[in-house]
Amino acid sequence: MTRKTKFYLQAIATVMILISVIVVPIIPVKVFLIALLLFMYYYFARRIKTVTPEEQMIILKEEEVWRASREPTPTITLSETIHEVKEMHEEILEKSDEQTISEYS
């Protein structure tokens, strides 16, 4: 995650938590929210790796190559399915008609 992304995420989370601290009248909840805020700062600083924009581009390209190397999963649309069912139905009708004709011949 880039430094800019980290900053924006922390800013949004900080504002939301601080609004909650101000609005909530219960002291234990305020203490919990402040502890949560401190934990968030610790986690973002120590646990989430900061990469440069160049490193992020390399990572994204590697992910793109990995995704491209995977076999694509076949996708079937509803119209294809309906078309296949209609064909199967027509085949069954043709076979039943042939059997009926051969029975009476």
Image (cartoon, grey):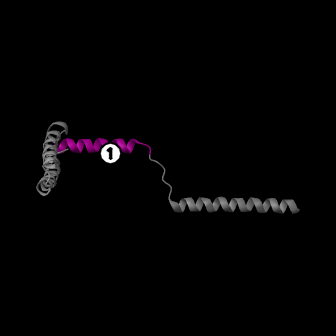
Q: Which residue is mark 1?
A: 64
The residue shown at (79%, 60%) is: 98
Residue 100, image x and y in percent?
A: 82, 62
- Main SS of the magenta segment? helix
> In the rendered structure, which amino acid carries the disc numbered 1?
Glu
In screen coordinates, is 103 left or right of 72? right
Q: Which residues are magenta?
A: 52-71
Quadrant, the C terminus:
bottom right
Front residue (pair 24, 52): 24
In screen coordinates, is 99 left or right of 33? right
The residue shown at (13%, 46%) is: 31
Reply yes or no: does residue 89 show up in magenta: no
| Disc 1 element | helix
Q: Quadrant of residue 39?
A: top left
> Pointer 1: residues within 10 angstroms few (<14), some, or many (20+)?
few
The residue shown at (38%, 45%) is: 68
Label count reads 1
The residue shown at (61%, 60%) is: 85
State whether residue 46 is above or below residue 78.
above
